[in-house]
Image: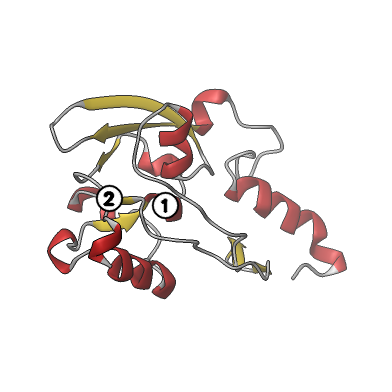
Amino acid sequence: SCQQDTRRACLNDMLAARGLLRRGARSLATVAEVTVNVTFIDHEGSRAVVPGRVGMTLAEVADLHGIDIGPTTIGAPTHVVHSPNWTEDKFGNGIGFGYDHVQIPPAWRDKLTAMTKQESEMLEFYWDEEDLSDASRLASQIKLKKDLDGIQVYIPDGIPTAGSF
């Protein structure tokens, strides 16, 4: 948590983490600096290149542009890491369910935050083993950062039916 003497530094860290402030500068970011282009590719090979904003999740970007990745829901986050010095406890419930399965190509995986235990459990609960791979993630758990500009996201065919879990 922020101490009194570092409150300004914590605020700057928070704004910079959200892409709203350039590190080392006191000016707000431009639209171009917070825009991230995402290419969604469905199971038939159709592509949609759409803009998102730093801090949005892939699920939010898909929903904003009418791209069906299946139903998504997420409770309030359990915590938010704003900087190496500041992790804010949120006491939320986290992921609601795991229908928003997407696959991320290897070239982009190292740029993503690590999969949480809860995300892994949701994927395993809602999807059959043959539907999952190292590329599997939940779209609601991937927050856009500027270094993800141009990311490709594969949308698998269908969501699990009631009889499959």
- Circle 2 packing at 10 Å, graded few (<14), some (14-19), many (20+), is some
> Residue at 85% across / 65% down in the picture?
5
Give the vertical position of 127 relative to 54 (above or below): below
Of residue 123 and residue 143, the one placed in the foreground of this image is 123
Residue to which mark 1 is pinned: 142
* Residue type indicated by callout 1: Ile
* Residue 33 point in image, percent of width and height: 51, 30
Q: CA distance from mark 1 to mark 2?
A: 19 Å
* Residue 13 point in image, percent of width and height: 66, 54
Q: Is residue 43 left or right of residue 119?
A: left
Q: Is residue 33 left or right of residue 127?
A: right
Residue to which mark 2 is pinned: 159
Give the vertical position of 135 relative to 145 (above or below): below
* Residue 135 point in image, percent of width and height: 21, 57
**Helix, strand or loop for disc 1:** loop
Looking at this view, name the residue that lies furthest to the front.
163
